Amino acid sequence: MLKKVVCLVLPEVAPFEFGVICEVFGIDRSATGGPTFDFTVATAVPGPVRTSLGFEMVITENLDVAADADLIAVPAHAIGHVDEAYLEVIRAAEARGAWVLSVCSGAFALAEAGILNGRRSTTHWMHTDRLAAHFPQTTVDPGVLFVDDRKVVTSAGTASGIDAALHIVRKEHGAAATNVIARRMVVPPQRDGGQAQYIDYPVTEECADSFAEVAEWMLQNLHEDLTVEQLARRALMSPRTFARRFRADMGTTPAAWLNKQRIMRAQHLLERTDEPLERIAAETGFGAAAVMRHHFLKVLQTTPTAYRRAFGRQLIAG
């Protein structure tokens, strides 16, 4: 289970991306039933570190504290040569099987350390061509929020770092613990890493309102066999227009969004109830336990039984 987290502060660190890591991992949420991490901020040479906005932060810990961390997080920083001391910490973390997370341009430090070789990765869409050109041994996906390739997680710009960090929490502590953090941060508890980084064209206010209503109705009727045709009728659109605009507004297809919501609901029930798998599958729209198992293996790389065994006793207060 994830316990110790160390955030590496490189020169010209971006304050927002640094703050994302601090917000997810650095706050004691035990009073509301959330997880608490042993969180430390470290740099190669303790003392003032200049940020990308020009002001300085004083970091007191050196990189020795990262030797046994369960997660090494690298927020965005100025793209360029990275001090070998940081690269050694990143390589050592990957070698011992710890999680490694980058936000935005932090991916360049992971690439320079060599741990993205043979892995998929991403970064902010403005930098993906540069990452791919300078580090051809990684497969760069320019259109996703984050990539998790064997515990090395790279995320796109700014807020996608929240999604990537919550993804790691969910993997280690379960959906209920993640929901506590998301509720405190007032953000969605789960956005799929495969969602688009950006929308190609603006969505009208009327369209957004329609999808808000349809999405709420979908959540209330997960147990039903919902089709695009049925959803399109509720949104007063043709199926083709509905599918296109849903993807533009929600960042994914109706089927993928619905499947993700069903998995999230199933996770909640597995963690908080003793209901049999067949009943949970029926309540969440999977129909049968075997179908639910298939989707858990595909998306979460685990089975419902194993998930319940890992997280079923962690009853997080709402």
Image (cartoon, helix red, strand yellow):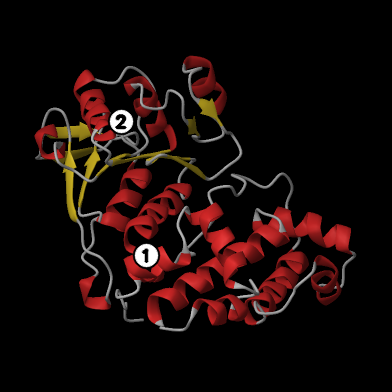
Q: Which mark is residue 274?
A: none
User: In this orientation, does residue 51 appear?
Assistant: yes
Give me the residue at 58% from left, 62% from top: 260
Please name the amino acid that badge 1 sits on.
Answer: Gly
Q: In which image quadrant can residue 104 be found? A: top left
Is residue 156 toward the left or the right of residue 249 in the image?
left
Q: Is residue 109 above or below residue 158?
A: above
- Crowd around label 2: few <14 · some 14–19 · many ≥20 (10 Å): some
Q: Is residue 271 left or right of residue 126?
A: left
Q: Say which residue appears at 14% left-offset and 33% top-offset.
A: 63
Residue 96 falls in image quadrant: top left
Question: Picture coordinates of residue 223 (x, y %)?
Answer: 66, 79
Q: Which residue is mark 1?
A: 174
On screen, 60 above or below 284?
A: above
Left or right: 203 in relation to 257: right
User: Which residue is outermost to the front?
Assistant: 290
Relative image position of residue 250 (x, y in whole percent): 66, 58
Look at mark 2 in the image and give the residue it sits on. Answer: 12
Q: CA distance from mark 1 to mark 2?
A: 34 Å
- Asked if disc 1 and disc 2 are in contact, CB closer than 8 Å, the reply is no
The one of 132 and 296 positioned closer to us in this rendering: 296
Name which residue type carries label 2.
Glu
Q: Residue furthest right?
A: 238
Q: Residue 254, percent across and down?
A: 72, 61
Marks counted in the figure total 2
Give above or below for 23 relative to 29.
above
Marks 1 and 2, the one that precedes in the sequence: 2
> In which quadrant will I find the N terminus?
bottom left
In terms of secondary structure, where does tag 1 sit? Answer: loop
- Of helix, strand and loop, which one carries label 2? loop
User: Is residue 189 among what the camera can see?
Assistant: no
